[in-house]
Structure formats: C-alpha cells, structure tokens
Image (cartoon, grey):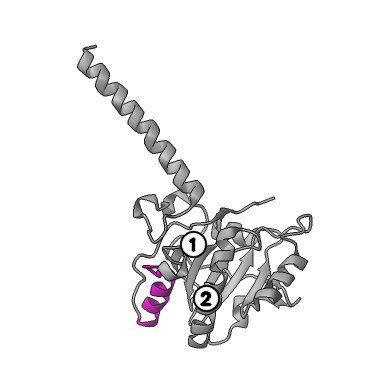
Amino acid sequence: MKKSNLILAIVLVVCSVFTTANLNAQERKGPPKGDHNPEQKESQTEMSGYKIGDVATDFKLKNVDGTSFSMSNLKDAKGYIVVFTCNECPFAKMYEDRLIELHNEYAPKGYSVITINPNVSETNEKENFKAMQIRAEEKAFPFVYLADVEHKVSTKYGAIRTPHVYLLDKKLKVQYIGTIDDNATSSEDVKVKFLENAINSLETGKKPTPNFTKAIGCPIKYN
C-alpha cells in the first residue's frame, strides 16, 4: 500500500472513532440547548408499536384518584395527547409544567393530556402507585396520571422513552409521534413546539409537519 493511501486510511479510522464517541456523548447529555438535530431522528421503521396513520386501541388503566380511565371517558374529544412519562426521570420532570400548561390551554378545545407511567412498579418506592399519587398531588396535575402496571399499553404504542408523545385525532388515528419541543432543559429557549404545532394543524384540518421526531428522555424500564 502506498504511503499516501495508508495515511488516508488512518485519518478515516480516527474520524470514524471520534464521530461515534461524540454522538454517544450527545445521547448521554440529551439534546443541545435550543437545538433539535434532525439527523438524530429515529426512523419509524426501526420502532415497534404504532406508526403514523395507525388507529390506536382504547385502554383501561387505573388513575391516581383510584378510578379506571379510558379515552372513551372524554366525551366530545377532538384529539388525545398521550404522553408516556414517570416520576423520576429528569427529562420527565423538566416537562411537567409544560404539560400542565398544554392541558390547561388545549383541554377546553378538546385535546386533553393523558399521562401514563410505564415504569410503575410496586417494588420501586419511587415509581410505585403511591409515589405517583404523591407526585400528582405535589404538582397539582390537572390531567390523569395512569399506571401501566402490566406494560401492555406502552408496549403496544411502542414507547421507548420518558417522555414519549403520541397525538391522536378524534378517531384515535396516530397523527404525531415524538418529543414535545426542541429544548428539554429550558422552556424559555424553545424554538420549535413540535407537539403544539401538531395540535394546531389538526385544529385547522391539516396534517402535522413534521409528524415524527425523536423522543428525548430516559429509556423506559420494562422490569
């Protein structure tokens, strides 16, 4: 092998290693502040569960108030904001106030937030049903907070992170999947409100664009 070709090969290997290490570091740190990188989107074809255009199946889960909840409970709903979240994930906590604001603004318009905890476990005192009740009371959640004890709903949806959002229309057809906005760490520095834009698109009879983004958060623990 010529010396010039050998040098080129070494440079390519070094660049490849550096790029992989950098992407892994970014994944651990979460999204860059004020930025959403479209190159890091997950492909729908690589995910299990519902895809855009699929019709979701209604479910029945226990709410923190002790009652059973189904989407059919929401009469005259124009859509459903299904969010898989939990108590302890830092990303989930960052988005709690934003979800409260979203619900307060859009529930009167027919789009209620429905939060579901896929990490609930009675052996985990920070994620058991009692802890969910305490968290809901502390934050004064205006929306339901449901326990997916058997993980049937979260696996059917294909949720992999907390938070992970699925926006359904009134016929339960999936219209948007992904993240809430482009800045988990600072609501004040958000540039693109993906979920809110998707809801507004449905309100005007349009298809959300984009309809799929990468969910940024903690991996769901299916114990």
Kind of residue at badge 1: Thr
Dot 1 falls on a residue whose secondary structure is loop
Residue displayed at 57% across by 86% down: 75
Going from N to C along the chain, the mark reached first, 2 or 1, is 2
Label placed on residue 106:
none
Name the residue furthest top: 1
Image position of 66 with respect to 12: above or below = below
The span picked out in magenta is: 190-204
Dot 2 falls on a residue whose secondary structure is strand
Q: Nearer the viewer, residue 34 or 88?
A: 34
Quarter holding the N terminus?
A: top left
Q: CA distance from mark 2 to mark 1?
A: 25 Å
113 in the magenta segment: no
Q: Which residue is mark 2?
A: 80
Image position of 39 with respect to 152: above or below = above
Mark 2 or mark 1, whichever is nearer to me: 1
Label placed on residue 185:
1
Residue 129 in the figure: left or right of residue 163: right
- Whole-percent x, y for residue 52 in the image: 43, 63
- Whole-percent x, y for residue 69 in the image: 67, 76
Residue displayed at 49% across by 57% down: 216
Residue 179 in the figure: left or right of residue 145: left
